[in-house]
Amino acid sequence: MSLSKMLEILDADIICIQETKLSRKDMEDLQNFALADGWLSFFSFCTHRSGYSGVATFCRASTAQPLAAEEGLAGTVGPQNDLMAREGLTRMHSDPSDNFWDRYRREDLEMIDNQGRCVITDHGAFVLFNCYGPAVTNITNDRFAFKMQFYEVLQHRIEGVLHAGRPAVVAGDLNIAPYPIDHCDFVKAPAYIQAGMLTNRPDRAWFRRMLQEEGGPLVDLFRKKHPNEQKSYTVWDMATLARKRNHGSRVDFLLAASPEHLTESTKRSAETCQEEGAQQPFDEMFTDVRIWSGFEGSDHAPVWADLKLPEPLPMGERPPALSLANRRTGAGPRQGKITSWLQGAPPAKRRKVDSQIDTPPRESLDDIFC
């Protein structure tokens, strides 16, 4: 199957893929699996290990060309030239005196960026984070500390977007099942086992704190639409044929937040907004969210959503420099920084509308398109 055919089958304007397992040297064969007519592609590669990690965001050029794009979360990657310069939000703080970045060693921030775990695209009405979270689940493993650092930096970047008055969307494989209902080993377990599941992993606790129902800014869009639906999983162990038995977990998410959800004091329900004649929260614009459980070709199932905005997404005059076509040819103009868009753009107009397992290795894009 060609990339163009796969993108058309998915029938979306923006498509986020995790664990591409591609490296920069694979760009020699881009025509086969990275470039598609009518699409812009934005990749982040793992720089120190081949066939590992990697994310890609594909945007339909006619409807969803980003205003700006950035690779990584901490601002440590990107060639040192004008065309390829990082276009980012990286130093966007809620407080000018914020010393958040001083908590981390330079090498730790470089590791967060160099594993190919995030691409950020600014679509005007929202800023999109396409993320692939570390899969480690053993809290005694040295990599677990790295996992927590990754999510701390992600949280800081999300909060920076919200403090700038912009909605945010997080899409991807976070490698965390936050609640018992999200994991086959816990959904029917005794209460004391479920209680242990909720307390024995700092990454799960972090995720729940980020969700709106526990005081955070993020709305789990699938759970908002399907609050009590059980056995709705997105990943299965293919080696044990677990998908046939639906023995899996839900670790792939679409999350949304708007500035009014940043703190409890400013958070208001959609009903209250409607009563007061105020604009509707951004997450209410998602009219449908589902897991495409019948889609095969990976050990993960896609999660999709319909977003109905009051007007078409704004598009820049030219594709962002991070676009893979520019990176391959060396062509293309210098792109403005995401910070300038964040600081200058008004909030999106809103319309009123009626124990987790590590995810096993996934097939690479190269394997799928053979």
Image (cartoon, helix red, strand yellow):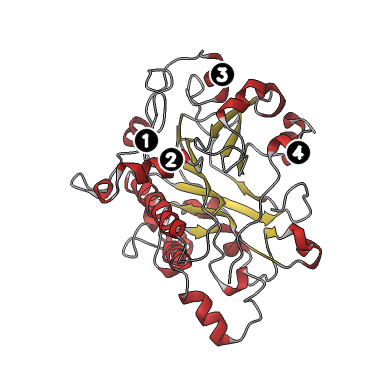
Circle 3 is placed at which residue position? Answer: 328
Q: Residue drawn at (28%, 45%), measured in percent from left and top?
A: 93
Marks 3 and 2 sit apart, C-alpha to C-alpha, by 20 Å
Q: Residue drawn at (55%, 42%), measured in percent from left and top?
A: 309
Query: How many numbered marks appear?
Result: 4
Q: SS class of the residue under badge 2?
A: helix
Asked if disc 3 and disc 4 are in contact, CB closer than 8 Å, the reply is: no
Mark with earlier residue (3, 4): 3
Asked if disc 2 and disc 1 are in contact, CB closer than 8 Å, the reply is: yes
Residue 368 circle label: 4
Residue 308, x across and y down, in percent:
59, 45
Residue 76 circle label: 1
In the displayed structure, would residue 52 be above or below residue 266? Answer: above
Q: Is residue 69 left or right of residue 88?
A: right
Mark with earlier residue (2, 1): 1
Marks 1 and 3 sit apart, C-alpha to C-alpha, by 21 Å
Residue 320, x across and y down, in percent:
48, 24
In the displayed structure, would residue 150 be above or below residue 244? Answer: above
Mark with earlier residue (4, 1): 1
Circle 2 is placed at which residue position? Answer: 113
Q: Is residue 119 left or right of residue 164?
A: right
Q: SS class of the residue under badge 4?
A: helix
Q: SS class of the residue under badge 1?
A: loop
